[in-house]
Image: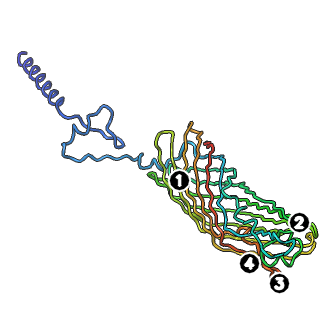
Amino acid sequence: MRRTSIFLASLLVVCGTLRAVRADEPARLRITDGQLAAGSASASDSVPATAPIISYDVAGADAIFDGPDFPWYSQVQAVMLRRTPIKSQTILVEDPAAGTNPLSVSVPRVNANELSFNNNAQLGLGLTIGRQIDNVSTFELHYWGLMHWTSGSVTYGANSLSLPGTIAITMQDFFLADEAAIAYESNLNNVELNYQQTLNGMSLLGGFRYINLHENFDMRFHDVDSGTSNYNVQTVNHLIGGQVGIGWHLEPSERLSLDLFSKIGFFGNAQRMSQWMADFGNTLPRRDAKDFSSHTSFVAELGVNARYRISECVSIFGGYRFMWMTGLALAPSQLDFNDAPGAAATFSAQNDNFKLYGPHAGIELRW
């Protein structure tokens, strides 16, 4: 019995010693999906200080390709653009001494540059619908347009107003007339389909663009002695082609973001021009010319856009854009004041350009 008691006491001492030794050992690590198990010791307790610690995050690598909670969005915005003047050209002259010595001297009265919407602002509409594929990729269909510029003038004379050039002296209503009314209209519309990818704040863009520019220029002369006749010119520019762009995305705060963007493109311009002129109260046609041709145009656009997120689904935004368009056929440049036999001006001038600039503002909805 005594031996049994001594054996049990010795066993209890040994078990207590082993338990104390295990309590002093480092805790074992259990890694699940790259993370320490809850309640386990830190990695620094289980490896030497000089040993490298390897970590990985599978979810973080795939996060940029996750679909957003609200992938679809639409925008409605007001666009206000100003248009710079076009090239200078005299389109109306006056002979002050017409009553006594016609054609002794001709004084320029109206220049086409004065009627070219000299920085006049016009309000238009912008509509956008987009689909965000993932956190970096977006498809967007964008329209802005309904831009309608108008300009004109009415000049009165005393049997002294004429067209410049040699054609005036071969006509009745356009030579030494009493009144000249000039009207210039221009309409612009723009449609784009773009794919954009933004990563680490830099955006790359590629897509297609269509721009339609339709212009009408009309000169109406009234002569008390003969009648009222018109000289009318119309041009249409259809710019179709691809474009590329680059931009930068900044987020100063959780709700505020800024975007800088630039786009350039070379476009095929399917251009159409027509002009018509008649005399003796528009009863005697003098010119009926048309031209259909194609050439290359260039468009560049720069801009900035600021967005403020009101909620997860609603944002307001505003910004400013600058555009430069070249290779255009504008209506005033097609005026032909030379007295050529048959139909004149059968080839349109296609080397015009102008600039557009102005602000925009709107609202965005996501769903």
Q: CA separation, marks 1 and 2?
A: 61 Å
Asked which secondary structure carries label 3, the reply is: loop
Residue 313 in the image, given as x and y percentages of width and height: 59, 39
Above or below, 269 against 124 in this view is below
Sequence order check, earlier mark of 1 and 3: 1
| Residue depth check, mark 1 versus mark 3: number of the one nearer the observer | 3
Q: Nearer the viewer, residue 279 or 163?
A: 163
Q: Nearer the viewer, residue 261 or 84?
A: 84
Badge 2 is on which residue? 222
Residue 185 in the image, given as x and y percentages of width and height: 76, 60
For this view, does 188 lie left or right of residue 168? left
- The residue positioned 63% from the left and 72% from the top of the image is 296
Residue 213 in the image, given as x and y percentages of width and height: 71, 63
Amino acid on which the number 2 mark rests in the picture = His
For this view, does 22 lie left or right of residue 81? left
Q: Nearer the viewer, residue 58 or 194?
A: 194
Q: CA separation, marks 1 and 4?
A: 45 Å
Badge 3 is on which residue? 341
